[in-house]
Image (tube, rainbow, N blue to C red):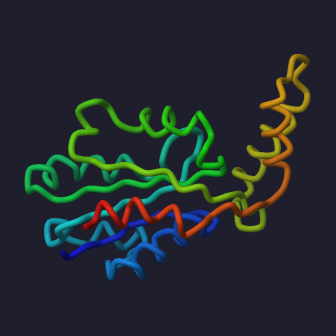
Amino acid sequence: MKTIVIYTSQTGFTKRYAEWISEASGAECVDFKQAKKIKLSDYDAIIFGGWFMAGGIKNLAWFKNQLPSLSAAGKKIIVYGVGGSPAESPDIPFAMERNFSGEEWKGVKSFYCPGGLNYDKMNFLSRFAMKMLAKSLTSKKDATEKDKDMAQMISHSYDISDKKYIEPILAELK
């Protein structure tokens, strides 16, 4: 099966997952910037990976525009989103669902892969937004334990990525 992994990554976590998937499956691996020049209909399976930003998967809109023709051609379509939350977070299913309408979900398999935060590789705006979020969580008058835990977690860089999270993606390719 001819497979391609397309990814967009700001701090390296989504790229790491793309490379792991590519290595394990033999898929071609390309950055989003090159993907626009590739004829996706030449592939049997197309995997798109993006990082979460404000609840949305980065550059997913471009990929969603490709879905009608890919679905009509019977292509295997997989999307994975990478974020800073642990895989067990109860917020993950909601975050994944809000990226597709009911109709768009047909024929798309989606997965979440925990990544982390790397303040050294973030652009200024992203760093600023995360620091402001941490500050707002800690300064809330009625902050919950969940708020406090999240503020503590995002106050520094961390890496919770793990190869085990690509196993369901690889199984879907078989």
The quarter of the displayed image where residue 146 is located: top right
Q: Residue at x 46, y 70 (%)?
A: 18
Q: Residue at x 27, y 71 (%)?
A: 37
In the rendered view, tell whether residue 125 sits above or below residue 143: below
Quarter of the figure that contains the N terminus: bottom left
Q: Residue at x 85, y 34 (%)?
A: 148
In the rendered view, tell whether residue 147 sits above or below residue 70: above
x then y, percent, for residue 151: 83, 40
Left or right of 172? Residue 53 is right
| Residue found at the very far top of the displayed protein | 142
x then y, percent, for residue 76: 21, 59
Q: Residue at x 30, y 66 (%)?
A: 36
In the rendered view, tell whether residue 11 sits above or below residue 126: below
x then y, percent, for residue 121: 71, 67
Counting the numbered discs, the total is: 0
Quarter of the figure that contains the C terminus: bottom left
x then y, percent, for residue 171: 33, 63
Left or right of 134? Residue 39 is left
The quarter of the displayed image where residue 9 is located: bottom right
